[in-house]
Image (cartoon, rainbow, N blue to C red):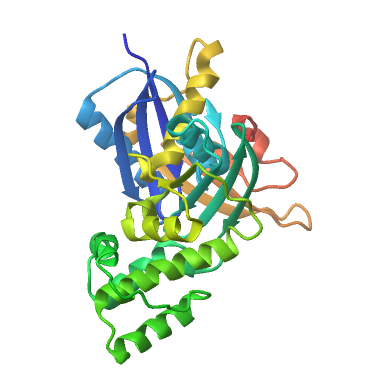
Amino acid sequence: MKEYYLGVDVGSVSTNIVIIDENNDVIVKKYIRTKGRPIKAIQSGLKEIKEEIGEIEIKGVGTTGSGRYLSSILIGADIVKNEITAHAVAALNFVPDVKTILEIGGQDSKIIILRDGIVTDFAMNTVCAAGTGSFLDRQAARLGIDIKEFGELALKSNNPIRIAGRCAVFAESDMIHKQQLGHNQEDIINGLCEALVRNYLSNVGKGKEILAPVVFQGGVAANVGIKRAFERALDMEVYVPNHYDVMGAIGSAILAREEVKSKEVSKFKGFEVADTDYKVKGFECNDCANMCEVIQILAEDKVIARWGDKCGKWTNLSDINLQRLA
């Protein structure tokens, strides 16, 4: 009988859920917009998976992303890990000798440096939008084109132009200026791809030793114009995995498979989680000068977890301490 493992990556833009088998092959994947409601996104993803492949036995569960603690409580995770580790594990599964991972999502980007299969350095950019996917989304909307066409149009450019990419505001005003000068759309789009890559390498990749093999993942990796711009800037081939958009979830599923090897039973609560009535409530603790903002998760009106307090007074209510592993 095949064994299946569930990986969940909850981010601010998307919630990604995958199921892999014992060979790390992806059986099913879901990319769902979080829209500020991570619980609903997780439930929606699990429901879609159940409807698509039916009830299967999950041997292990891993969670990652900014909402990894929340998701681990909801679904019952066997392991909780940060995004850096999860993305690195997934990339190593795709290119075993990978030395550099370029990851660009909707609202943040990161670079991960590996040597001999071990993460030795990393950097993240969560401030400047000019190095993220949301920057491209806005410019595509301004140009009146579908973001899915963005990369292919960039490849048709015959006369690359330079667009200021240090800041999203400057890039937008410079792009408008180039439109007014009469440059064609393909050249402007290619210029925007070049600008994003320059911004990424000068901010996120600043001071990092980028060595091949290089793996490019995250939602923006679908853009062939950005991939080609990276290859020109780095003068080396850049690999894009088949499941580039859910690599964090894949990494957490692989970690779960390793974690449960010595366990007989997974903590997974089952696909019925999709039908559970969850609520999130918060309150301010006034017992000391810290005045902590405590978050509590309720399932069917029963408190199942609390966090946010510095002293542990409220957290100790549940087994959430077990989640503080990553």
Q: How many marks?
A: 0
Residue 55 appears at what percent x and percent y? 26, 21
Question: In this rendering, is residue 274 above or below 310?
Answer: above
Residue found 71% across the figure and 40% down from its top:
313
Residue 273 placement (x, y as % from top left): 36, 32
Q: In this view, does 144 lie above or below 254?
A: below
Q: In the image, residue 90 lies at what x, y percent? A: 47, 34
Q: In which quarter of the image is residue 138?
A: bottom left
Residue 138 is at least partly visible in this image:
no
Question: Which residue is at the far bottom?
Answer: 180
Q: Tell me: residue 29, above or below residue 224.
A: above
**Quadrant of the frame with the N terminus:** top left
Nearer the observer, 43 or 181: 181
Residue at x 34%, y 69% (from the top left corner): 190
Q: In this view, does 276 lie to the left or right of 62?
A: left
Residue drawn at x 68%, y 54% as measured from the top left: 292
Whether 11 is drawn above or below 266: the answer is below
Q: Which of 151 and 74 is in front in this view?
A: 151
The answer to whether residue 41 of the structure is visible from this angle is yes
**Quadrant of the rendered image containing residue 269:** top left
Report x, y in % for residue 215.
46, 44
- Left or right: residue 211 versus residue 257 is right
- In the picture provided, is 69 more to the left or to the right than 31? right
The quarter of the picture where the C terminus appears is top right
